[in-house]
Amino acid sequence: MNRSVLNILIIILFLIGIVGAGSLVLEEIRTGEGCPKFGFVPACYIILAFFVLPFIAHIFKKWNVIYFLGTGLALIIATVASIMQLTGNAECPKTGGGTPMCYYSFIILASLIVLKLMHLKNKNI
């Protein structure tokens, strides 16, 4: 796949993730009930940070460690949240259609990691 196409796909996925997590952060600020908490920290704050920091690293074409650390940690959180949602041990925020957002986060974050690996592999294109 062409490097510029990969770049555009990565940016689009980041924007979707940032808008999704950002909407949860706004709901959390407004109502205090937008997302589950890790201790006293709302999980959506953490996920939003793990979308924004790797996005910045990608845009500036630097800090691949930050890219993979951020997306990797967020993927772990999304994986755990998705498993807990499936087993009934937790409740992820849902979209208007009723789909748990942790499922979408899992798919987006896994895709971001795969696309970045492809992007780096195709560096000479």
Image (cartoon, grey):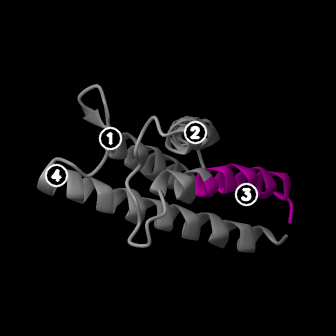
Q: Is residue 109 magenta?
A: yes
Q: Is residue 121 above or below residue 10?
A: above
Q: Nearer the viewer, residue 71 or 24?
A: 24
Residue 64 rendering spot, x and y as whole percentages:
63, 42
Q: Amino acid at mark 4?
A: Ile
Q: Amino acid at mark 3?
A: Leu
Q: CA distance from mark 2 to mark 3?
A: 24 Å
Residue topped by disc 3: 115
Name the residue at 60% across, 38% down: 72
Residues rendered magenta in the picture:
107-125
Prevailing secondary structure of the magenta residues? helix
Q: Nearer the viewer, mark 2 or mark 3?
A: 2
Question: Earlier along the polypeptide chain: callout 1 or callout 4?
Answer: 4
The nearer-to-camera label among 1 and 2 is 2
Amino acid on which the number 1 mark rests in the picture: Pro
Image point 60% across, 58% down: which residue?
108
- Which of the 4 quarters of the picture holds residue 73? top right
Query: Do tag 3 and tag 4 residues touch (Cβ < 8 Å)?
Result: no
Numbered badge on residue 29:
4
Q: From the viewer's perspective, is the residue at label 3 or at label 1 nearer?
A: 1
Name the spot of residue 113 as percent of width and height, x first: 68, 49
Residue 125 is left or right of residue 21, and the answer is: right
Q: Which residue in the structure is indicated by mark 1? A: 36
Helix, strand or loop at label 1? It is loop
Q: Are marks 3 and 1 in contact (CB under 8 Å)?
A: no
Q: Which residue is mark 2?
A: 83
